[in-house]
Image: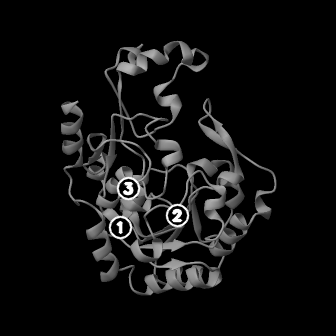
Amino acid sequence: MLHLIADKIISSAGDEYVFHPFGKYNEVFKEFNIAQSFIFLQHGVTKDDQTAWLNRYNMNFKGIVTAARREYESFLSLPYYYNPENIWLTGFPRFDRLYQDDQGKITIMPTWRKNLVSEMNFVSEMRGGKAGFKDTSYYRFYKNLLTDERLLEAAEKNNYQLCFLLHPAMRAYEDAFDGLKGVTIIKHAEYRRIYAESSLVVTDYSSAVFDFAYLRKPVVYCQFDKNSFYDNHLYRQGYFDYEKDGFGEVETTLEGIVNRIIEYINEDCKLKEKYLKRINSFFNVLDTNNCERVLKKILEI
């Protein structure tokens, strides 16, 4: 009932079940959506080509919130088919809630792989696992990384805590990493707290690290499957080039990523000037007034 009488639907999820929540009666109620305004807050900076999903003829958002100039421009230059008044360069509301509370944690948080999980179950809000996960290159790589003796020794010697967080879409495999010595497996994540307490974040292609970079903290990209990642995912690579635009080094081998993490450990996980400049130039603004700007845009509709 609340959905049917709403003038505006505002969400960080752009999935159909958010704005067509009527199950088998979707077709009956779809006509009500014509008069509604759907504002997409986004759940990550759109750095990749998401035109197949987020285009106007598929979603028809009234407003799409963006946080970076190049992100904003990509929505207008690529075939999303939106008008400038539909794309808002305001910053993400959740950025206002970021805070600093460094606890000496090094958090490894790779994104998900579409080919390793089943379709979303909208009742449980989870994707299921598939047989043979421990035989995949994904599992073997991260298992080897998390059990690397040199990395574990460097972390312990310098009082850093290694943490591992699977993407929510990969929750079915959390137990596969249980029992690793010297590593904390994070199973119930409050991302804002993770960003606050981490000194360094290691990811592969996740947009989650944009929040971390917003705090001006160092990132390292671990892309062991660089040549095949986009072949098995929902989107294509966009304007963001990790080598040229990323907020940290890009490593493609186990030895390379171990060496790079140890290097940051030995330097007290200090953000390098090169990457500080990239962070400052990427975001439109770095402040705590994002909610105010988004609210102003919503009220203009």
Sequence order check, earlier mark of 1 and 2: 1
Query: Would you call the spot at circle 2 few (<14 residues within 10 Å), some (14-19), or many (20 or more)?
Result: some
Position above or below: 78 against 227: above
- First in sequence: mark 1 or mark 3? 3
Q: Quickly name the residue at label 1.
A: 102
The N terminus lies in quadrant: top left
Residue under the point 63% across and 74% down: 145
Residue at (63%, 80%) from the top-left corner?
253
Can you give x and y, in whole percent of width and height, for residue 250 in the image? 51, 77
Instruction: Please provide percent x and percent y for residue 297.
Output: 21, 38
Q: How many numbered marks are there?
A: 3
C-alpha separation, residue under disc 2 versus residue under disc 3 = 18 Å
Residue denoted by label 3: 74
Eyeballing the image, is 257 above or below 242? below
Say if residue 271 shows up in the picture. no
Quarter of image, res 236: bottom right
> Tag 3: residue type?
Ser
CA distance for labels 1 and 3: 34 Å
Q: Residue at x 30, y 66 (%)?
A: 282
Say whether residue 132 is left or right of residue 146: right
Whether tag 2 and tag 3 are in contact, CB under 8 A, the answer is no
In the structure shown, which secondary structural element does the residue marked by tag 1 occupy? loop
Name the one closer to the observer, 228 or 186.
228
